[in-house]
Image: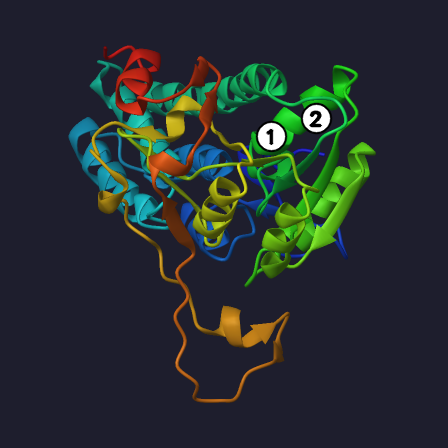
């Protein structure tokens, strides 16, 4: 079941807003429509958003009718800026868009550029799947048979091209013969853990127990959770990591209870341009996501709401960062630069 595919000059998305009740697909042929799908979380997860951003550039290019190269490039660059703003925290989106824009440096005519843009977008998707499987194999070495692993939000196949990052680590450990069980936090306010992670793990036949976000400390204090594995939307040069809101809380709890806290993400999520997590933009989403659950009002009308979609976990709380190029440990600044080939 593919999260995202390029099929007959259109993007085919598994609509994650309908899971687990229904498995529906969207067929999208307009880049503005794809931007809306990203914004409303029909597709989500940093690597998957990056892939969608690449295909959005392709759709935008196909919609430009001019054969004048300079005019084509100008219009595409304008579309690119709109695409990059769809979700600002996940760096994979701007990374993928910028990578496709580099294709414009070639000397091809407009039609040639369109062909190269599609090839580059497909390459990003193919590379992501390879990266997921590589980082999963590295991460699996950190988990011991018999452990119960806590994960937050959804960092599985649904959040990537295939296989997953945090859930990929768990899958690889299971495929390697290790006896692993999972506790998944429900992940308020949009319940990605309850709706998506638990669904994915059930499909894979991996034992999963669903808990509310506020139960994690209780189970850690009872010694029932041996490690935490989460994904990431952006990793700063010093190892500070942005991930779904609530991740920082889990990291603090994990450190207090001496539970290893692992971050699993491809190197496309690493942003060496930011010295620390203080520079990571945090997306603030609609208050209705907090005051309603699947359209049902659960809070009084008129109540003030804050709804940051992400928080930043300082590097001091992270035991290791798992990538397709290896496992980084403290000091992260030197290690991440080494992995990225800049040190």
**For marks 1 and 2 on the same chain, the one whose residue lies earlier in the sequence:** 1
Q: Confirm whether residue 273 shows in the render.
A: yes
Q: Confirm whether residue 15 shows in the render.
A: no
In the picture, measured across the screen, residue 97 lies left or right of residue 229, that is left
Label count reads 2
Residue drawn at x 51%, y 23% as measured from the top left: 128
Q: In this picture, is 235 found above or below 290?
A: above
Residue 275, image x, y percentages: 20, 33
SS at mark 2 in the image: helix
Please tell me which residue lies in front, 88 or 244. Answer: 244
| Farthest bottom residue in view | 301
Quadrant including the C terminus: top left
In the picture, measured across the screen, residue 335 lies left or right of residue 228, that is left
Q: How dense is the environment of label 1, judged by Cα within 10 Å: few (below 14), some, or many (20 and up)?
A: many
User: Which of the 4 image quarters holds residue 117?
Assistant: top left
Residue 116, image x, y percentages: 38, 18
Q: Any mark on residue 171, and which?
A: 2
The colouring scheme, among rainbow, by chain, secondary structure or one colour, is rainbow
Q: In this picture, is 331 found above or below 306?
A: above
Residue drawn at x 58%, y 46% as measured from the top left: 152
In the picture, measured across the screen, residue 337 lies left or right of residue 305, that is left
Residue 137, image x, y percentages: 61, 15
Please tell me which residue lies in front, 77 or 291. Answer: 291
Q: Disc 1 marks which residue?
A: 164
SS at mark 1 in the image: loop
| Farthest left residue in view | 70
In the picture, measured across the screen, residue 84 lies left or right of residue 253, that is left
Residue drawn at x 60%, y 30% as measured from the top left: 164
Answer yes or no: do the residues labelled 1 and 2 have beta carbons within 8 Å?
yes
Residue drawn at x 22%, y 32% as measured from the top left: 73
**What is the distance, in whole Å, between disc 1 and disc 2 at their CAs?**
9 Å
């Amino acid at each position: 079941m593919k999260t995202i595919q390029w099929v007959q000059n259109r993007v085919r998305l598994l609509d994650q807003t309908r899971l687990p009740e229904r498995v529906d697909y969207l067929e999208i042929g307009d880049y503005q429509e794809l931007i809306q799908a990203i914004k409303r979380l029909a597709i989500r997860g940093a690597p998957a958003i990056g892939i969608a951003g690449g295909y959005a550039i392709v759709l935008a290019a196909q919609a430009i009718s001019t054969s004048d190269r300079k005019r084509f490039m100008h219009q595409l660059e304008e579309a690119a800026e709109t695409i990059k703003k769809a979700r600002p925290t996940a760096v994979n989106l701007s990374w993928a868009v910028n990578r496709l824009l580099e294709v414009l440096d070639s000397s091809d005519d407009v039609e040639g550029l369109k062909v190269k843009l599609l090839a580059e977008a497909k390459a990003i998707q193919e590379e992501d799947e390879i990266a997921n499987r590589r980082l999963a194999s590295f991460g699996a070495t950190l988990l011991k048979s018999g452990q119960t692993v806590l994960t937050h939000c959804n960092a599985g196949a649904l959040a990537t091209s295939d296989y997953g990052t945090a859930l990929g680590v768990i899958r690889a450990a299971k495929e390697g013969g290790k006896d692993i069980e999972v506790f998944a936090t429900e992940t308020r306010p949009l319940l990605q853990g309850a709706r998506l992670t638990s669904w994915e793990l059930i499909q894979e036949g991996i034992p999963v127990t669903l808990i509310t976000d506020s139960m994690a400390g209780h189970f850690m204090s009872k010694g029932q959770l041996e490690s935490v594995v989460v994904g990431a939307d952006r990793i700063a040069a010093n190892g500070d990591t942005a991930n779904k809101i609530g991740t920082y809380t889990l990291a603090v709890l994990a450190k207090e209870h001496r539970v290893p806290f692992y971050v699993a993400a491809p190197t496309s999520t690493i942003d060496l341009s930011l010295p620390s997590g203080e520079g990571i933009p945090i997306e603030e989403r609609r208050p209705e996501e907090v005051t309603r659950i699947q359209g049902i009002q659960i809070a009084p009308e008129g109540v003030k709401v804050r709804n940051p979609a992400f928080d930043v976990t300082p590097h001091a709380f992270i035991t290791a960062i798992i990538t397709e190029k290896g496992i980084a440990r403290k000091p992260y600044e030197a290690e991440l630069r080494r992995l990225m080939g800049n040190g």
